């Protein structure tokens, strides 16, 4: 690279004197004045911004600026305004029984709107965005419930959960008939055939016949002689087409073998009581809530099947 200034013949602009490869020159052409003025204005604007608004970080804080503006404060003010606007609804939800909230259309709609947001944040990971459930996670849109589907029963289940260590949680569990060697594999196969016959599925008739006595000796105390289940114990209804872990022979055998034993958090340990009520009303509103479940015999109400 050489350093020889000259006037470029094409543009008439002096070069910087930098030359590459013998004939490539760099023009010494200044920036347009409008660009420079804009640049200088931006510098002045930034200095003014530093003075007026929060800008420079300090050890444990930051400079506040002469206006004392804070985005965090603004957001907090907006949250406070939002809470103030909702205060009357939340107060009523806190004070009223669930049945009374359900009868108040305005309060009910507010509750399910809030409950839908809470469900998306806390429950959808297991039950799905549409509450459709999946293998091992109940569908909350149908009318098939393990622990009962009226407002109070749903509220209790959400509040305290299932098999999570909370002293008020639903805590009954199905025995591990296989892993605890209560039944051998042949017996498990036979009783699975019998259980599947309750739902009119294709089974080995001879195996189902053998399994009937095994069922009577080991399963009827919880699921009932007719397989209708028992909500007090969380024992599923075995006669319908809804199976929490699948209805295939192998899936039912695995349920008998291991007892499954799903776990649900106690949401009252994580959310405030009003939020739990709102979640309850949202789940109830999905269409599977049992309006008369509280007065119906537990064993006659369909439950989530294994």
Image (cartoon, helix red, strand yellow):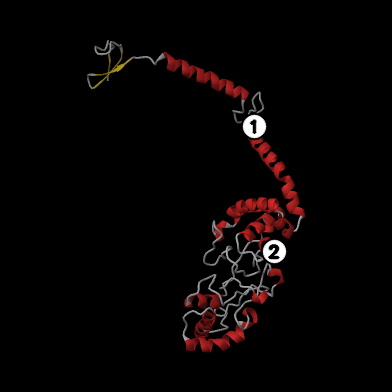
> Which residue is at a point 70% across and 42% down the rendered structure image?
85
Spot occupied by residue 192 in the image (x, y as percentages of width and height) = 52, 81
> Which residue is at a point 58% across and 53% down the rendered structure image?
120
Relative side of 68 to 200, left or right: right
Residue 305: quadrant of the picture: bottom right
The residue lying toward the viewer, choosing from 271 and 204, is: 204
> Which residue is at a point 68% across and 41% down the rendered structure image?
82
Spot occupied by residue 156 in the image (x, y as percentages of width and height) = 69, 64
Relative side of 80 to 260, left or right: right
Q: Secondary structure under badge 1?
A: loop
Relative side of 80 to 286, left or right: right
- Crowd around label 1: few <14 · some 14–19 · many ≥20 (10 Å): few
The residue lying toward the viewer, choosing from 63 and 87, is: 87
Q: Which residue is mark 2?
A: 156
Spot occupied by residue 77 in the image (x, y as percentages of width and height) = 68, 36
* The disc label shown at residue 70, or none: 1
Q: In the rendered view, would you say 259 is above or below 165?
A: below
Spot occupied by residue 129 in the image (x, y as percentages of width and height) = 54, 56
State which tag comes first along the sequence, 2 or 1: 1
Q: In the rendered view, would you say 199 is above or below 21?
A: below
Quadrant where the C terminus sits is bottom right
């Amino acid at each position: 690279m050489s350093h020889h200034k000259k006037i470029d013949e094409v543009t008439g602009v002096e070069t910087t004197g930098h030359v590459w490869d013998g004939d490539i020159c760099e023009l010494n052409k200044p920036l347009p004045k409008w660009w420079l003025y804009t640049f200088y204005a931006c510098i002045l604007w930034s200095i003014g911004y530093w003075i007026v608004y929060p800008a420079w970080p300090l050890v444990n804080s930051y400079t506040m600026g002469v206006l004392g503006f804070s985005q965090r404060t603004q957001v907090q003010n907006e949250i406070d305004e939002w809470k103030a606007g909702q205060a009357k609804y939340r107060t009523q939800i806190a004070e009223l029984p669930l049945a009374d909230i359900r009868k108040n259309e305005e309060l009910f709609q507010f509750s399910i709107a809030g409950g839908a947001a809470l469900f998306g944040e806390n429950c959808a990971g297991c039950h799905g965005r549409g509450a459709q459930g999946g293998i091992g996670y109940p569908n909350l849109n149908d009318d098939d419930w393990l622990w009962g589907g009226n407002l109070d029963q749903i509220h209790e289940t959400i509040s305290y959960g299932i098999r999570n260590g909370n002293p008020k949680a639903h805590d009954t569990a199905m025995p591990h008939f296989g892993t605890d060697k209560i039944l051998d594999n042949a017996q498990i196969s036979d009783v699975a055939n019998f259980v599947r016959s309750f739902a009119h599925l294709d089974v080995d008739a001879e195996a189902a016949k053998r399994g009937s006595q095994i069922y009577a000796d080991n399963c009827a105390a919880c699921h009932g002689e007719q397989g209708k289940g028992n909500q007090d114990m969380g024992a599923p209804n075995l006669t319908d087409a809804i199976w929490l872990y699948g209805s295939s022979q192998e899936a039912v055998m695995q349920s008998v073998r291991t007892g499954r034993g799903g776990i649900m958090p106690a949401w009252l340990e994580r959310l405030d009581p009003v939020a739990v009520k709102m979640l309850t009303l949202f789940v109830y509103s999905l269409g599977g809530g049992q309006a008369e479940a509280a007065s119906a015999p537990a064993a006659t109400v369909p439950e989530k099947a294994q």
